[in-house]
Image (tube, grey):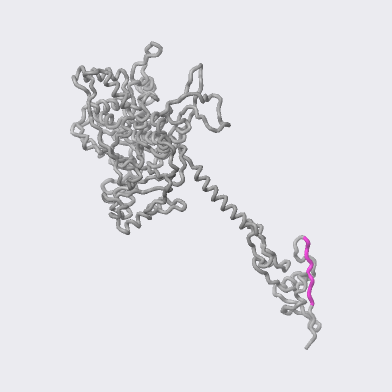
Amino acid sequence: MEDKKTVCLQSFSSPMTGEFTSTPIILGIRALRATFANLTWVGNKVAPEPLKPSNEAAASARFGCALIPACAGQQRYDARTNTCIDPVCSAYALMVVDEQSKTCVWATWVPYVFGILVVFLSAGDILSQRRFKVAGVVVHQEEICFNVQVQSLNWYAGTGLTDEEETRLLWLLQETFPCMGSVVTKETTLSTKENHSTEIIEVGPRQQFVTAWCTNAVSICLSAGIASVDRIEKTRRYLIESPSSPEIREKFLAEIHDRMTEMEYPADSGGFCYVEAVEPAAWGEVDVMAEGKQALERFSEANGLGYDSQDVDYYVKLFRDELKRNPTTVECFDLAQGNSEHSRHWFFGGKLVVDGEEVPHTLFQLVKNPYRRVQQREKEGGRPNASTVAFSDNSSAIRGAAGGFTGLLPDLSTGEFSESSLIYDITFTCETHNFPCGVAPFPGAETGTGGRLRDGQSTGRGSLVLAGTAAYCVGALYLEDADREVDWEDRSWKYPSNLAKPVDILIQASNGASDYGNKFGEPVVNGFCRSYAAVVGGERIEWVKPIMMSGGIGSMDCRHRLKQTPPMPGAAIVKLGGPAYRLGVGGGAASSMVAGENQEHLDFNAVQRGDAQMLQRVNRVIRYLVEMGEGNPVLSIHDQGAGGAGNVLKEIGEPTGLEIDMKHMLSGDP
């Protein structure tokens, strides 16, 4: 066998890059390394030879003939240095290299810190629960309950729902409320202590008050194949420390529910099966024949009717001197709403006397004066008057583009779309909802937006709404942050107890208006807010009674500009919307009174509660009717607001008169 000699070529590394830099056969060395080969002398020739494991070959990584080391664990091989590099465990929080396995492991002190952290968080969770207080009452836990009425039976009684329907219903409720860790079950998760130191309070909708949420939930159940569900209402249950006094308990209840639309459920009620023992109030007479105006004043004050001295004198003369009889309580209530300042604007059209001198113009005349100048300019040959509806309807309107609107409109008989050209007037309405927002900001702003939307819909013989605006003006904010105190706010000033705090009005009223617009589907595109309270010339000037302004723009088919007046004899009266409630009907009178004059519970009762989903359904009907064009069957349309039926029926029936059977009006109250 020929004698063989192995030659290893030494590599020269650059201190900057670690690459070969000064070898005469650098490419050859790299090629040899790539094939794991050495140079072997055979006689007088040099040729490559496959690399064989040997102690000599593994002796040094400085030579091209070194073997590739075996890396362990999470080590990685570096071909430039022919070494194994440990993992960079510092890239992972709280981890170090294990020298034996060459892997990243938790530092030895981490489990101890983690255990301490768990204990700390658990203690913090317990303490945070004890710090969760509402009106001074400690709340330990909350849960949401769904009370389901199935074909006049109750779900918890075990009847009415099939196993498949029950599974679907549980899935629907679970998917609707995907709260972290929440599970929908048929059993409560709350339990009281045996020493009676805790109790459970449940609040939810009044039994006769069908909520908008229920309306949607029942529709969803029907679409999901659960046809036996008649009603679903959502209630809230609180596990609390037993209050130390009835007064504290009442304050807690006032904070967690709306006392006009919700109620406390007795502990043994079983939820939805509890029915309020409410009977319709009996009507009577107000004895003006014997007591005169004192009887009417006393009845007005007790029921928040807002009669002023002129109202009392007029009604006493009407009933006692002309009709020769006592008015009924129903008549007094009806007159208070229909003839209120809110509904009739007597002050705007009344005579003004300032400092003993009569002002030559009424407020309405001042407001209408710019429009009259436009009319006069048109008569004199000037620019044509663009107004098509002004001071005569629920909204004003201006003439649309001369070219009209060209677009696709449906054929309501076939459902097919075709190109049509129509002229649409641009409508705009704006109103304030001050009293309701001062008493109950969230529902007050909700119905402010809703009332303004109804005004837009009931212009002419029906119109469409597009977008809205909202604005708020309140008094001194009195922010709790000391850094935000301002010099002009005097914390000694007094305010009516029935009004919410200005800062709460800004927050809650804004939330209410946006909430209603979102549920209805109308964007609020702009607005503003103001806070002002100061002493000017020795006189306190402030928005004590707040201003909530809501405006809206829309469009109306020019063929529907004018209502038919007077009403056509024999025409049917159709009421669109949900059931009527006693709640909110007194708003016409209450909103016409000076802030703070009315009794607090009557003010709260006079604020309507919004149902944006129902108004959206009404909007679909109105849209269908107005898109009938010449075939629109609507002769006149008005919205029912705070004055209730006592106002809207007079508006739509003037001057012909109406015949109304109140038993045919859908009522939500008993």
Whether residue 188 sits left or right of residue 299 in the image: it is right
Question: Is residue 70 or residue 331 the one in the foreground?
Answer: 331
Image coords of residue 527 (percent x, y): 46, 33
Question: Is residue 585 or residue 11 the one in the foreground?
Answer: 585
Q: Which quarter of the figure is the N terminus placed in?
A: bottom right
Q: Which quarter of the figure is the C terminus placed in?
A: top left
Q: Quadrant of residue 554?
A: top left
Image coords of residue 648 (percent x, y): 28, 31
Using the image, determine if residue 275 lies above or below residue 591. below
| Residue 14 lies in the magenta stretch | yes
Whether residue 559 sits left or right of residue 518 in the image: it is left
| Residue 378 lies in the magenta stretch | no
Query: In the image, what residue occupies the spot 36% across and 27% down?
Result: 599
Q: Which residues are magenta?
A: 7-15
Q: Residue lying farthest front? A: 195
Query: In this view of the protein, can residue 666 be seen by the observer?
Result: yes
Query: In the image, what residue occupies the spot 55% across and 27% down?
Result: 486
Whether residue 354 sits left or right of residue 650 in the image: it is right
Image coords of residue 582 (percent x, y): 30, 34
